[in-house]
Amino acid sequence: MDWNSVDDSSFRAHIAEFVRAHCPRELRFPKRRLRLAEVRDWYKALSNAEMLAPAWPARYGGMGLNPSKTLVYLEAMEASGAPRLPDQGIINLGPLLIKHGTEQQRAYYLPRILSAEHIWCQGYSEPNAGSDLASLRTTAVLDGDEYVVNGQKIWTTWAYDATHIFALVRTDAGVAKQAGISFLMLDLAQPGITVRPIETLMGHAEFCEVFFDNARTSKSNLVGEPNQGWTVAKALLGFERIWAGSPRQAQQLLGQLRQYVMQAELQHSATVLDRLTQFEFDVADLQACYARFAVVVGRGEPLGADVSILKVWATETCQRIAEYFVEVAGDLATIQGDVAFAGGTVDVLTPYLDSRSFTIYGGSSEIQRNILAKSVLNLPV
Ligand SMILES: Cc1cc2nc3c(=O)[nH]c(=O)nc-3n(C[C@H](O)[C@H](O)[C@H](O)COP(=O)(O)OP(=O)(O)OC[C@H]3O[C@@H](n4cnc5c(N)ncnc54)[C@H](O)[C@@H]3O)c2cc1C
């Protein structure tokens, strides 16, 4: 099937229909990241229909979509409420192996990602290496045909459900910090690895600490050349830079706020109306900004440093709306989860708590502003 030749609206309709037919209603528009056990059947349904890996080439079991169609795929999935899968293997490792891996690595790992036999998590951040990732201290030392890994990762999303981890590790401490890093794949099911969940503000154990105590992996699980891990990992920073700026979450949140304002009959308050109108403009600006970058992606061109504005605007708009929702909802905002209101339910606190993390992951707002200051505005930073 050459999906790229299908027009965008038919393609959107196909995805929407597929979600309706194969993704149970109770899984759609989830308020938290769902566990593997909850989404495994949906993962398999996508895999069986060869619709799991939009951007992988068809010869590796992907849909072979061009960047513009991949964006349409992601938008349509999000608009239909399809839950996010434990997708590090699909969106990060798979494309990386296709670009930098060996034929043996591709032949072994890619089919196992598609079949859900292997679920991957991303082990980059460490307790003192987040924004300054190149300061990471987890070491890997070659011992015969195996690397021996020692250290700790943190904020590893979905590690408790994962079977494998791809990690950045220090293989040479005697050179400039970015130069001594390698990209390694490890099986989590071994005595040298401990995974400990961390409970979030929302009360869910969404991410974990991962401890390596003489953990082992074959040297054939090194991706790229030794000490070239920084370059390999940076090659991943393509698509997610625009995806982090999708207007969808802000649109949904604004819809919920608008509905609440009408139900609570607050639309006659000039103050409320003023704020609501401001948010409408903010979300419209976000949509326009996103559309501008989507055109660049559609042309197959690389995104420039200016895409940082998109992440800042998308995530901070969500936070502003969520904060105002709490302010205007009074007592209703004191309880997490659905609260009875106006013959239905409203959940004010969950989006507020959820939106706290948006400005941290994928490069914090401060880091994005540093990039804009340095690379776009040419300010002396
Ligand atoms: C929901 C969520 C999921 C995540 N999933 C993963 C995952 O799966 N795998 C993974 O490896 N990591 C993951 N992370 C970690 C994420 O990448 C880091 O939290 C992020 O890089 C920030 O690092 P840090 O938490 O160490 O904060 P720090 O880097 O310690 O920053 C603390 C504060 O200082 C500010 N700051 C830092 N440096 C500067 C500077 N130079 N100039 C100005 N301000 C600065 C930051 O903006 C921030 O406000 C996740 C994080 C979240 C919130």
Image (tube, rainbow, N blue to C red):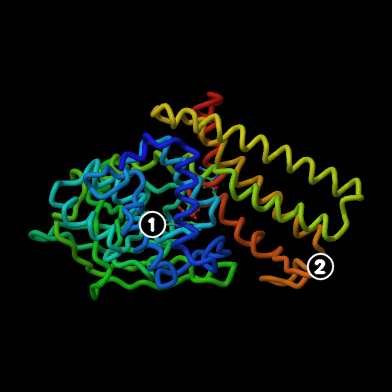
Question: Quick check: can you spot residue 177?
Answer: no
Q: How many neighbours does mark 2 have within 10 angstroms: few (below 14), some (14-19), or many (20 or more)?
A: few
Cβ–Cβ below 8 Å for labels 1 and 2? no
- Return the residue at label 2: 342
Mark 1 vs mark 2, CA separation in Å: 38 Å
- Return the residue at label 1: 87
Q: Going by the image, does 89 lie left or right of 83?
A: left
Q: Quadrant of the N terminus?
A: top left
Tell me what residue is drawn at x 62 percent, y 40 percent: 313
Q: Going by the image, does 171 lie left or right of 17?
A: left
Above or below for 210 versus 81: below
Q: Residue furthest top?
A: 378
Horizontal and vertical percent for residue 351? Answer: 64, 60
Question: Quick check: can you spot residue 182?
Answer: yes
Of the pair 203 and 30, the residue shown nearer to us: 30
Q: Residue type at mark 2?
A: Ala
Horizontal and vertical percent for residue 108? Answer: 17, 57
User: Mark 1 or 2 closer to N-term?
Assistant: 1
Tell me what residue is drawn at x 37 percent, y 34 percent: 5
Say which quarter of the image contains residue 298.
top left
Q: Residue type at mark 1?
A: Asp
Residue 270, disc:
none
Horizontal and vertical percent for residue 84? Answer: 46, 58
Horizontal and vertical percent for residue 375? Answer: 49, 28
- Element at badge 1? loop
